[in-house]
Amino acid sequence: MASFNRVILIGNLTRDPELRYIQTGMAVTDIGLAVNERRKTPSGEWVDDVNFIDITLWGRTAEVVCEYCTKGKPLFVEGRLKYDTWETDGQKRSKLKVIGERVQLIGSKEGGGGGSYEGDSYNRSSSAPRQQHQQPQQSGGYEAYDQAPPPEDDVPF
């Protein structure tokens, strides 16, 4: 029987991430993501249901999120579900959480696009709005439009 375990979430950080290192030197952080679901009640009113999801990030992904993200920052996370069980004071406990494998920062200081981080590769997108390709108005001929590369920002991805 085939199985598939994939989660895609977009939400806002519920707290500032805190970076720590395990004995092997691997970076790890646990973040909380608030994901809103907007629905209409039978009376016709719109309400927001908020789901709070715990996510664990490892390695360079954890370091990048801790360096560039703060509470309230919108974030795209792709990963997989993991069911943890443990015992505390004789009571069995369990929790379903997400292991984040790919993270994309949404927005920036300027309010534009972000970047994504997955493993050891960076994907870059500009914080400047994309230029729309426009047809020039005819005035006897077509004028050339400048297609300058987007400006570089200080985020390394």
Image: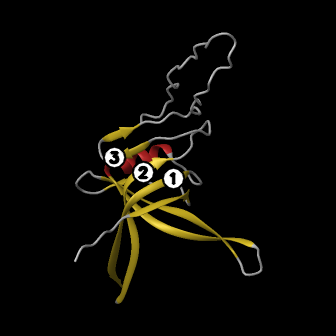
Depth-wise, is mark 1 or mark 3 nearer the camera?
Answer: 1
Q: How many callouts does the rendering have?
A: 3
Q: Extreme front residue here?
A: 140
SS at circle 2? strand
Q: How far apart are marks 1 and 2 (CA)?
A: 7 Å
The residue at which mark 2 appears reads as: 103
Mark 1 or mark 2: whose residue is earlier in sequence: 1
Whether label 1 touches label 3, CB < 8 Å: no
In terms of secondary structure, where does tag 1 sit?
A: strand
Q: Mark 1 points at which residue?
A: 75
> CB atoms at circles 1 and 2 under 8 Å apart?
yes
Q: What is the secondary structure assignment of the residue under circle 3? A: helix
Q: Disc 2 vs disc 3: Cβ atoms closer than 8 Å?
A: no
Residue at the image position 49 percent from the left and 30 percent from the top? 154
Foreground pick, 13 / 117: 117
Label 2 – label 3 distance at C-alpha: 11 Å
Looking at this view, name the residue that lies furthest to the top.
140
Residue depicted at 48% across the width and 61% down the height: 9
Residue 70 image position (x, y, % from top left) = 54, 50
Q: Which residue is drawn at 30% across and 47% down?
A: 119
Label 1 CA crowd tier, 10 Å (few <14, some 14–19, many 20+): many
Q: Which amino acid does label 2 sit on?
A: Val
Amino acid bearing label 1: Leu
Q: Crowdedness of circle 3 by 10 Å Cα count: few (<14), some, many (20+)?
A: some
Mark 3 residue type: Arg
